[in-house]
Image (tube, coloured by chain):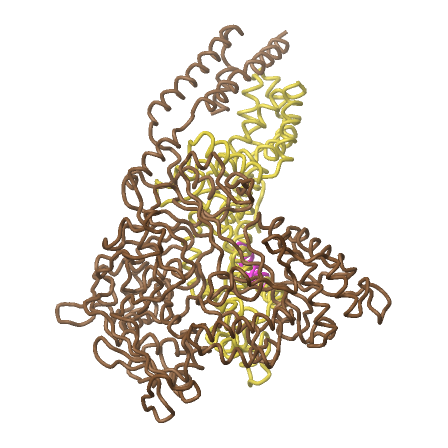
Chain colours: A brown, B yellow
């Protein structure tokens, strides 16, 4: 266009003033065009969704990392649970509103009947000691009338045979997605579907991440696993497994070894969702996997939503399951839930939203902008946008900035059930071991490494300094008196980190007065192993170095790649490291097992990364893990906390705090760190959203017209120069 | 010509084999099959048995390059390298370590990449040539000097700045287009405007300077002087004589990148959430998914070889003096 414009301008045989007139006319055209565009475009040009979706009950969310698995036997990470928890239904779930977290029936009619058995599989009475319990039966009865979502795997022809279980090569070749199999079918959920899924967990070809754990609990799990090792996935249907039996159409029994009260939490996880055998029969047909048509990508569940589109490279779409059974919004909650409007929908059938669109959004800037424009209904807060979103109040609290408040955005904060810590390798000759010298050295470091400062500098205050192994919200945490007395003291009604002099005193008592190593007569050198080798990690590493310098210790950062770091941890060659744990379920056992001796990473390949071993702690752990919550268990937990605080195998770091933002039209919002199936409770005020979007997204055209006009004006000197040259050549 | 093409294609076979071996060795120097298994199995409850299972399921339980436990040809064929690499030469990319079919993924992702890259290339070419010709037209004037300074300034700014600035100004402040996203068919147009615009704008500085150099070289040649002596105007000389003759180096530069357009742009696709091939490889490296890394490096090499071959062929089309033998 420029080329054409220039040549026409330059080739015109006319006076310069005429050219100027033309240029002015072009400018006017630009302006007129711009304003007519503005008049035309009363809509939203920046709307990334189709216009007809504007008034529909659609929830827009994002994901930054594509989920690897959708098979409930394999999926284990939070980004996978965000999808499959809406599709699959284990027998139990967490109550959406009640706290502390409470497991309630989902597809089950009631909580399971728990039966203790002795070695001879004879039923034991109440009040029997744990040592007498050889097995525990969980008898679960599910509701009748629950149906699987419509799916080609369940489609039958008029003769009553499965339509797509014997696909010929041509049909497979022609298929590009699951939607190409147009006929769908459904059937009722039965207890056998739950048993089938447990068998799937055991099949080595499925590669369930909990298979190794379940071997320790479910009776016959290991034997079954060996039995089906070389058989196809579908073969498990006809083979019995001792620990999981269907008792009737709607009742099944899981038999576990010994007593394991935490097993109920596993039953609320997607691993124990039902799976129809037809799913494997359909998806395992040769050639479908080459088209990415697998159970790992196209789930088949009974939940409130079904996967309508799975394009992890762009977007995932969940649609309301038309066959979803009757489930209603909870009618009870915490005392303040009524006041917060969280019980306004009590008793109404779930789900409220017809469609959920998850868009792939890798970069924080466009994600944040779209949230502010109203195109995402909820958002986290990245460090880039923290200052735009949050301000600290005079009392140290947090509040939204005025610009966000004007938009009606709400802030929700919650401390996660995660712990991040700095671990000492207890097998190390300097920082490890149970000697008084090493213990005091670890205690001194625990005081010196100021995690309050870390949270403030590197996390925008989004965290809580840890006082022990357990994060807030987990049974056994004493929120008021539960401070770590080896690191903190109670001053003026609040906890305060001990002065650095106390740490120096401990250093002297440990034999490192002034941080000097008596063997070398120089500053004690310690090694910090990390994967943080990038430029972005440098400030954090410098901060750690400075914390140790307070004690005169020289901290050497040994940055390495992820694989080498993991190798060092496995072989016990790391000295100091940082590590974290996110709760599988809200029970102290799921945190204390990280310090249980037989779980040592070096010796047993377990999750005890510090390789901590204390016989008293281990004894208490074994006692505590099988107990039901109550005063005796609480007391043991306090004893265990005391032991690890004193031994200090970890510098108890912090528990991150989630900051989530939601638009005003987002209803029924309550943080639930355990339940992943929250979408069915969410409601959107679509009229409010449509109005706000319209208000916030009117296009602005005049700067474009200005730029266009300026461009045209800039051509004037060019035309003049050319004409001067042209005249000069002529002469 | 046909013989030449066949010969070139045959030459490329050892080249591709070399690329394959190099990728394989470099990848496994950094990652062992155990590391890959750990990465895929996640952080929690990973035991030696589950790692062994994973390796067996994914075919990583064999030696890397040489299997001394086997007899005869199986010493070579029962290795990870053979099992994973031979299919590539038949464009069978296999299944990624996370279980997706790589060929299907590549097919799906190549088109969005092309949808951004092709218009960016064509419009960029047109704009750059126009501006370069304008600068040549006004050579030795303040317009040319000003233009060069502007080009140097534009070249000196990071492409990331253009992306963020473009998204901020056009997407956020003016609200004229969606700030990121993608859709199928014609609905993709509104998502392509901004990345294409930014792609074109960010390339103006270097593109204009490069084409200006080409045009200036041509402008000094005898046939141009002859054209001027015949009384042609400067614009006629430029558009009718200089431009066609300068097309040879332009064409060479363009043809060589044509096949690589499928491979997409890492930053652009990431910022605009375009589901292309640009960040497919980087994601795979981060996830230690060797199957994808190997497939993408192989594909990149094949496309580059094709690009070079097309360049050679295009020479014969635009310059009759060139003969391939």
Q: Position of residue B17 (x, y in %)?
A: 57, 65
Q: Is residue A592 visible?
A: yes
| A246 to the left or right of B294 | left
Note whether B85 is above or below B177 in the view shown. Answer: below
The secondary structure that dominates the magenta segment is helix
Report the residue at 58% width, 16% height from top. Answer: A718
- Quick one: which residue is furthest to the right in this view? A521
Q: Is residue A230 visible?
A: no
Note whether A547 is above or below B131 in the view shown. Answer: below
Q: Position of residue A646 (x, y in %)?
A: 64, 70
Note whether A574 is above or below A221 in the view shown. Answer: above
Q: Is residue B279 magenta?
A: no
- Quick one: which residue is furthest to the bottom in this view? A120
Q: Which of A154 and B145 lies nearest the eye of the viewer?
A: A154
Q: Position of residue B288 (x, y in %)?
A: 54, 63
- Quick one: which residue is furthest to the left in this view? A158
Q: Position of residue B224 (x, y in %)?
A: 62, 24
Q: Which of B230 and A554 lies nearest the eye of the viewer?
A: A554
Q: Which of A322 and A352 lies nearest the eye of the viewer?
A: A352
* Quarter of the image where one finds residue B205: top right
Q: How many marks?
A: 0
Q: Which of B223 and A28 lies nearest the eye of the viewer?
A: A28
Q: Is residue B6 magenta?
A: yes
Magenta-drawn segment? B4-16
* Quarter of the image where one finds residue A678: bottom left
Report the residue at 44% width, 67% height from top. Answer: A585
Note whether A536 is above or below B130 in the view shown. Answer: below
Instruction: Say which quadrant the C terminus of chain A sits in.
Output: top right
């Amino acid at each position: 266009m420029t080329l054409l414009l220039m040549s026409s301008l330059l080739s015109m045989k006319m006076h310069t003033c005429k050219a100027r007139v033309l240029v002015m006319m072009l400018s006017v055209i630009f302006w007129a065009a711009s304003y007519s565009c503005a008049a035309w475009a009363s809509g939203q040009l920046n709307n990334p969704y189709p216009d007809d979706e504007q008034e529909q009950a659609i929830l827009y969310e994002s994901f930054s990392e594509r989920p690897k698995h959708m098979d409930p036997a394999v999926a284990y990470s939070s980004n996978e649970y965000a999808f499959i928890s809406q599709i699959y239904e284990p027998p139990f779930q967490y109550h959406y509103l009640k706290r502390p977290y409470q497991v309630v029936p989902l597809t089950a009619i009631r909580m399971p009947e728990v039966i203790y058995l002795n070695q001879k599989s004879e039923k034991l009475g109440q009040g029997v000691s744990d040592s007498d319990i050889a097995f525990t039966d969980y008898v679960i009865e599910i509701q009748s009338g629950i149906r699987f979502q419509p799916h080609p795997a369940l489609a039958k022809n008029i003769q009553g045979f499965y339509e797509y279980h014997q696909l010929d090569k041509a049909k497979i070749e022609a298929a590009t997605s699951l939607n190409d199999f147009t006929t769908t079918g459904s059937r009722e959920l039965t207890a056998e579907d739950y048993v089938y899924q447990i068998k799937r967990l055991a099949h080595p070809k499925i590669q369930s991440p909990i298979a190794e754990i379940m071997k320790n609990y479910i009776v016959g799990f290991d034997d079954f696993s060996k039995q089906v090792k070389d058989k196809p996935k579908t073969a498990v249907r006809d083979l019995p497994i001792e620990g999981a039996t269907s008792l009737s159409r709607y009742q099944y029994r899981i038999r576990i070894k010994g007593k394991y009260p935490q097993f109920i939490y596993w039953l609320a996880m997607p691993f124990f969702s039902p799976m129809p055998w037809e799913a494997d029969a359909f998806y395992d047909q040769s050639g479908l996997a080459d088209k990415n048509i697998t159970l790992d990508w196209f789930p088949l569940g009974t939940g409130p939503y079904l996967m309508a589109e799975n394009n992890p490279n762009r977007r995932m779409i969940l649609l309301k399951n038309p066959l979803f059974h009757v489930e209603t919004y909870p009618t009870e909650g915490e005392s303040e839930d009524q006041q917060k409007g969280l019980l306004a929908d009590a008793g109404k059938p779930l789900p409220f939203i017809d469609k959920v669109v998850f868009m792939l959004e890798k970069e924080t800037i466009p994600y944040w902008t779209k949230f502010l424009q109203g195109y995402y209904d909820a958002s986290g807060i990245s460090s880039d946008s923290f200052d735009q979103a949050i301000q600290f109040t005079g009392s140290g609290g947090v509040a939204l900035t005025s610009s966000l408040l004007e938009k009606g955005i709400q802030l929700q904060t919650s401390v996660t059930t995660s712990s991040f810590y700095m671990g000492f390798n207890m097998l190390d000759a300097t920082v490890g071991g149970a000697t008084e010298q090493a213990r005091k050295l670890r205690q001194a470091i625990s005081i010196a490494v100021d995690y309050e400062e870390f949270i403030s500098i590197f996390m925008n205050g989004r965290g809580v300094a840890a006082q022990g192994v357990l994060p807030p919200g987990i049974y056994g945490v004493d929120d008021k008196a539960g401070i770590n007395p080896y690191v903190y003291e109670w001053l003026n009604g609040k906890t305060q980190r001990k002065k650095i002099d106390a740490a120096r005193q401990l250093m002297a008592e440990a034999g490192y007065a002034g941080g000097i190593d008596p063997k070398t007569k120089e500053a004690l050198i310690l090694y910090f192993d990390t994967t943080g080798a990038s430029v972005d990690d440098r400030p954090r590493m410098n901060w750690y170095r400075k914390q140790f310098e307070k004690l005169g210790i020289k901290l050497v950062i040994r940055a390495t790649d992820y694989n080498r770091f993991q190798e060092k941890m496995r072989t016990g060659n790391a000295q100091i490291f940082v590590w974290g744990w996110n709760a599988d379920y809200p029970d102290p056992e799921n945190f204390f097992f990280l310090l249980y001796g037989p779980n040592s990473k070096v010796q047993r390949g377990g999750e005890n990364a510090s390789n901590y071993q204390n016989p008293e702690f281990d004894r208490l752990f074994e006692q505590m893990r099988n107990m039901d919550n109550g005063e005796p268990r609480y007391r043991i937990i306090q004893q265990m906390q005391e032991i690890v605080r004193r031994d200090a195998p970890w510098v108890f770091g912090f528990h991150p705090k989630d900051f989530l933002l939601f638009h005003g039209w987002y209803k029924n919002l309550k943080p639930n760190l355990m339940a992943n199936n929250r979408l069915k409770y969410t409601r959107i005020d679509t009229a409010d959203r449509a109005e706000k979007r319209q208000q916030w997204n009117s296009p602005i055209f005049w700067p474009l017209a200005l730029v266009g006009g300026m461009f045209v004006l800039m051509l004037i000197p060019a035309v003049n120069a050319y004409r001067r040259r042209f005249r000069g050549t002529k002469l | 010509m046909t013989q030449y093409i066949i010969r070139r294609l045959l030459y490329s076979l050892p080249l591709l084999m070399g690329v394959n071996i190099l990728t394989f060795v470099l990848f496994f120097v950094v990652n062992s099959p155990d590391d890959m298994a750990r990465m895929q199995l996640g952080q929690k409850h990973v035991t030696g048995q589950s790692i062994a299972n994973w390796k067996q399921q994914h075919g990583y339980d064999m030696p890397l390059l040489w299997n001394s436990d086997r007899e005869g040809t199986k010493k070579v064929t029962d290795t990870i390298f053979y099992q994973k690499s031979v299919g590539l030469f038949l464009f069978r990319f296999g299944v990624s370590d996370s279980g997706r079919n790589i060929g299907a993924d590549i097919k799906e992702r190549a088109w969005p990449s092309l949808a951004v890259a092709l218009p960016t290339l064509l419009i960029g070419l047109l704009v750059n040539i126009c501006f370069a010709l304008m600068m040549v037209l006004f050579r030795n004037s303040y317009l040319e000097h000003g233009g060069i300074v502007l080009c140097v300034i534009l070249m000196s700014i990071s492409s990331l700045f253009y992306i963020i600035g473009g998204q901020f100004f056009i997407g956020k402040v003016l609200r004229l287009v969606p700030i990121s996203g993608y859709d199928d068919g014609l609905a993709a147009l509104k998502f392509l405007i901004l990345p294409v615009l930014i792609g074109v704008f960010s390339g103006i500085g270097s593109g204009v300077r490069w084409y200006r150099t080409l045009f200036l070289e041509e402008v000094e040649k005898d046939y141009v002087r002859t054209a001027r002596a015949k009384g042609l105007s400067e614009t006629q000389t430029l558009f009718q004589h200089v431009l066609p003759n300068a097309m040879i180096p332009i064409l060479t530069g363009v043809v060589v990148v044509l096949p690589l357009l499928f491979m997409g742009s890492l930053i652009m696709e990431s910022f605009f959430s375009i589901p292309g091939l640009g960040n497919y490889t980087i994601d795979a490296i981060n996830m230690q998914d060797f199957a994808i890394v190997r497939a993408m490096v192989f594909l990149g090499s094949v496309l580059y070889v094709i690009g070079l071959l097309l360049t050679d062929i295009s020479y014969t089309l635009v310059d009759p003096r060139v003969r391939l033998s």
